[in-house]
């Protein structure tokens, strides 16, 4: 056994069964160890996609995702996906395969300081050394899984990978536990909820990582709390719940802000300000913050109390408190939901195929238990507000790092993690241009994956921002000529064009039953983004 074999055995013992990346000569020893040791190597089209895929793998499984790159440009490409895991709090191990130890630090082809590169976007960056492989890997996995979770970078010189192993593989150390909140803090939280007449809970991205999502619903049901979510927390409680009021700070945000600001208490549950700061929308309403970390707020936020500790424990204890009542009525919440959803769908021009109609068509075609992975742009705002999510981890997006290029590799990773569930990728044309090479990856893996491209010829979010700031439209148009029929395939993957909601719904339904991926180009009119995004 060499050290590369030892690395694979240790990662395998931690539950890691696949890694994403692109090889070079320096990566080959680790790849060969993966082949022999039973960890699948998934060849991606770009190292950034490998990082995104590893991020989603970590979210979906609770086991650190794994991504691998060579030195220099491979490492710099990988950082985009690793940064995503850092700000979105996903457990991940990123391995860069480097030169031999005696070449490190020299002015030599492709060499840069990987530790300086990864330090700002990881929880730790560690060197793999002869005689300390198991110890270093154990520490890396422990750090990645300790809350708040995140990525750890490991640098592997080629001579270290090939050297005979001096150690045995061993189980990873247990992640550090978050201490439980004080009893007095829980009691005070219960009093604030009980005394509020119009409380509203807002679930955030820390809530995505609770061990038992039923505890979230338990608190909502016990205390009859109307609840909103941030983008990443959608689906942690089925949004068909009668107390659900939708996503905040996305499309038609002013509709949601008016309701939130009518509350007399905001209960932030697992609310991480990496998605959106409290001060952006709370406007003086008293705040009760319940999370694993103290609230990050400015002085204008009226923070009246915090419950800081293990979130599962806090939720269990909140459910055990006497049930609270408030003055919210079911009809008022229903009316709000209907008004919000109506505002998201402005009346289109005759014969227009709008982006919001396309999103609804995809939602109808995807079964309730299905997973949506989507990308960053104007459509992100529309999807976050408009889409109804029914299950935890069924709504995959980056909202901390918020990088274009996430949607397609995220969908591939979600399908690999949960092959029994239907998965749809829904992305904009700009995002597709960034990651279209990953279509070939989905084909190689034989994944039944509809890839719906909302094609409106623009970087639509930036176009909206240019119009709102009264700048001329410049540098944001993706295509000027009229569209012709799409090609028969991309990289051997069937490609179809649709121009209506019914045709899109039918195409997605058919693609879900295929034996491989399908690219579906939906040419849409996105003019309504000007009325819904940031409104």
Image: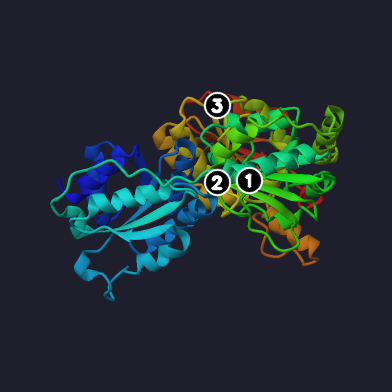
The mark closer to the camera, 3 or 2, is 2
Q: Does dot 3 land on a helix, a strand or a loop?
A: helix
* Residue 404 on image: x %, y %: 57, 53
Label 2 belongs to which residue?
A: 309
Label 3 belongs to which residue?
A: 512
| Residue 110 horizontal side relative to residue 257, left or right | left
**Residue 496 visible in this rendered orientation of the protein:** no
Dots 1 and 3: beta carbons under 8 Å?
A: no
Who is closer to the viewer here, 298 or 385?
298
Who is closer to the viewer here, 486 or 318?
318
Task: Work out how far the residue at label 3 is from the one at label 2, CA to CA, in angstroms.
Answer: 42 Å
* Residue 364 on image: x %, y %: 68, 27
* Residue 283 on image: x %, y %: 80, 55
Task: Work out how far the residue at label 2 is from the one at label 1, CA to CA, in angstroms.
Answer: 10 Å
- Where 350 sits versus 7, above or below? above
Label 1 belongs to which residue?
A: 185
């Amino acid at each position: 056994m060499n050290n590369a074999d030892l690395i694979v055995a240790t990662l395998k013992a931690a539950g890691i069964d696949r890694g994403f990346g692109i090889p070079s000569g320096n990566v080959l020893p680790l790849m060969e160890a993966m082949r022999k040791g039973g960890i699948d190597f998934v060849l991606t089209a770009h190292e950034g996609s490998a990082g995104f895929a590893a991020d989603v793998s970590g979210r979906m499984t609770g086991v650190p995702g794994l991504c691998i790159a060579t030195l220099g440009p491979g490492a710099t490409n990988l950082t985009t996906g690793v940064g995503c895991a850092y700000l979105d709090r996903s457990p991940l191990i990123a391995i860069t395969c480097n030169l031999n130890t005696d070449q490190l630090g020299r002015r030599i082809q492709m060499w840069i300081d990987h530790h300086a590169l990864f330090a700002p976007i990881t929880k730790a960056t560690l060197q793999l050394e002869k005689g300390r492989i198991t110890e270093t890997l154990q520490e890396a996995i422990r750090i990645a899984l300790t809350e708040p979770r995140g990525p750890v970078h490991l640098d592997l010189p080629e001579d270290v990978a090939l050297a005979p192993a001096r150690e045995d593989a061993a189980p990873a150390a247990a992640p550090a536990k978050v201490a439980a909140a004080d009893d007095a803090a829980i009691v005070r939280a219960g009093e604030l909820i009980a005394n509020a007449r119009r409380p509203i809970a807002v679930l955030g991205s820390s809530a995505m990582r609770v061990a038992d999502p039923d505890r979230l619903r338990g608190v909502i049901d016990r205390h009859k709390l109307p609840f909103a979510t941030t983008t990443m927390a959608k689906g942690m409680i089925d949004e068909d719940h009668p107390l659900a009021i939708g996503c905040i700070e996305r499309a038609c945000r002013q509709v949601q802000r008016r309701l939130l600001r009518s509350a007399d208490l905001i209960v932030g549950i697992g609310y991480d300000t990496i998605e959106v700061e409290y001060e952006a929308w709370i406007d003086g309403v008293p705040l009760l913050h319940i999370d694993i970390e103290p609230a990050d707020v400015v002085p204008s936020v009226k923070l009246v109390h915090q419950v800081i500790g293990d979130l599962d424990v806090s939720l269990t204890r909140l459910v055990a408190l006497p049930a609270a009542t408030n003055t919210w009525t079911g009809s008022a919440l229903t009316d709000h939901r209907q008004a919000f959803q109506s505002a998201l769908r402005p009346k289109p021009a005759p014969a227009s195929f709008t982006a919001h109609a396309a999103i609804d068509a995809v939602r109808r075609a995807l079964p309730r238990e299905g997973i949506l992975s989507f990308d960053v742009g104007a459509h992100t705002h529309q999807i976050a507000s408009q889409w109804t999510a029914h299950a935890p981890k069924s709504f995959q997006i980056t909202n901390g790092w918020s990088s274009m290029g996430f949607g397609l590799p995220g969908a591939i990773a979600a399908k690999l993690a949960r092959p029994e569930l239907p998965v749809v990728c829904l992305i904009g044309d700009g995002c597709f241009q960034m990651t279209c090479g990953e279509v070939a990856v989905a084909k190689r893996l034989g994944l039944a994956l509809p890839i719906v491209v909302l094609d409106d010829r623009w970087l639509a979010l930036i176009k909206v921002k240019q119009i709102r700031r009264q700048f001329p439209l410049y540098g944001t148009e993706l295509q000027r000529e009229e569209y012709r029929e799409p090609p028969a395939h991309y990289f051997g993957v069937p490609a179809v064009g649709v121009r209506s909601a019914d045709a899109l719904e039918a195409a997605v339904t058919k693609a879900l039953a295929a034996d491989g991926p399908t690219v579906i180009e939906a040419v849409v009119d996105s003019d309504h983004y000007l009325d819904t995004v940031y409104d």
